[in-house]
Every structure is written in C-alpha cells, then in structure tokens.
Image (spheres, grey):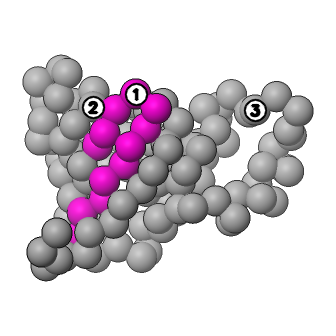
Amino acid sequence: MIPYGYNLSTLVEHSDRLKQVRKSELQSGDCVLVKTHNSVYQILVNKDGTYVVSGGWFDRKGLSPTTITIAGCSWGGSAIKVDIVAACGLRLEFGNRLITSPIQKIFVLPRGSDN
C-alpha cells in the first residue's frame, strides 16, 4: 500500500533518498542483515544472482537456509524497485512472493569481514 497522502510519482521521486542497498553494490559472499518491523533476515549474496536467506518467515516455516531470488522492494503495492535488495521504510519482496513488514535497519557485512 502506498502511504496515505502520497502518490506514486512522489514516492518514486523521493525513493533515491532512502537508506538502501543496491544489488549492483553487492559482491558474492557479502552478507546483508535486514531488520523489519517483525523479523530479522540474514541474506548471503551468491554470484549467480540468487541469495541464501535465513531468519524471519523462513525460520518459522523450517526452510532456513534457502536459496532464493529477491524481486526488490516496494511500498506494499504493485510498484517495485527491482534494483535494490533492501531499503528502509520499504518491504522486501522475495522471489517466492513473500513480502516482509517494513524494513527498519540494514547492515552490510562485506565478504571476508571479521564482524
């Protein structure tokens, strides 16, 4: 759903100001931690454009870890930013059509980091 009082063109115009992680910024082996309103997801980047995901819904369904694609992020409606893995305030959409609650925080751990 588009937040009340905003139209789609206004949201798109301001979407580049969101704290976000673009797919093009990530390398194979990087890890993205995404905290949503309801869950925490750990996303490991594969070199083939897929991701190994654990946490949240996948843990609750006994599916962690699972290899899946990421469609992008949206405001909860049909307009989706396909070039990003995560953006604060938006909802992460996985390739299985799972849509998360709004993203609150994002952490990127580059491949080889000792964190």
Left or right: residue 71 versus residue 76 is left
Tag 1's secondary structure?
A: loop
The percent position of residue 51, horizontal first and vertical second, equals: 24, 55
Q: Residues within 10 Å of mark 2 (few under 14, many from 20)?
A: some
Q: Residue at x 78, y 49 (%)?
A: 11
From the viewer's side, name the closer residue of 31 and 46.
31
Tag 1–tag 2 contact (CB < 8 Å):
yes
Q: Quadrant of the N terminus?
A: top right
The x, y position of residue 25, in whole percent, is 42, 76
10 Å neighbourhood of mark 1: few (<14), some, or many (≥20)? few
Marks 1 and 3, the one that precedes in the sequence: 3
Q: Is residue 38 magenta?
A: yes
Residue 56: assigned label: 2
Find residue 85 and name its label.
none
When the figure is inspected, residue 80 is found, relative to residue 51, above or below; the finding is: above
Question: Residue 32 lies in what quarter of the image?
Answer: bottom left
Could you tell me how far apart the alpha carbons at marks 1 and 2 are, in whole angstroms? 8 Å
Task: Indicate left or right for 105 with 18 as reference.
Answer: left
Taking 110 as reference, is 103 above or below it? Answer: above
Q: Is residue 103 above or below residue 98?
A: below
Going by the numbered disc 3, the residue's amino acid type is: Pro
Residue 3 numbered tag: 3
Residue at numbered disc 1: 38
Q: Is residue 29 visible?
A: no
Instruction: Please state which amino acid type lies under the numbered disc 1.
Output: Asn
> In the displayed image of the protein, which residue is found farthest to the front?
115
Which is in the foreground here, disc 1 or disc 3?
1
Residue sitting at 59 percent across and 53 percent down? 81
Q: Which element type, helix, strand or loop, lies under badge 3?
A: loop
Tell me which secondary structure the magenta stretch mostly adopts: strand
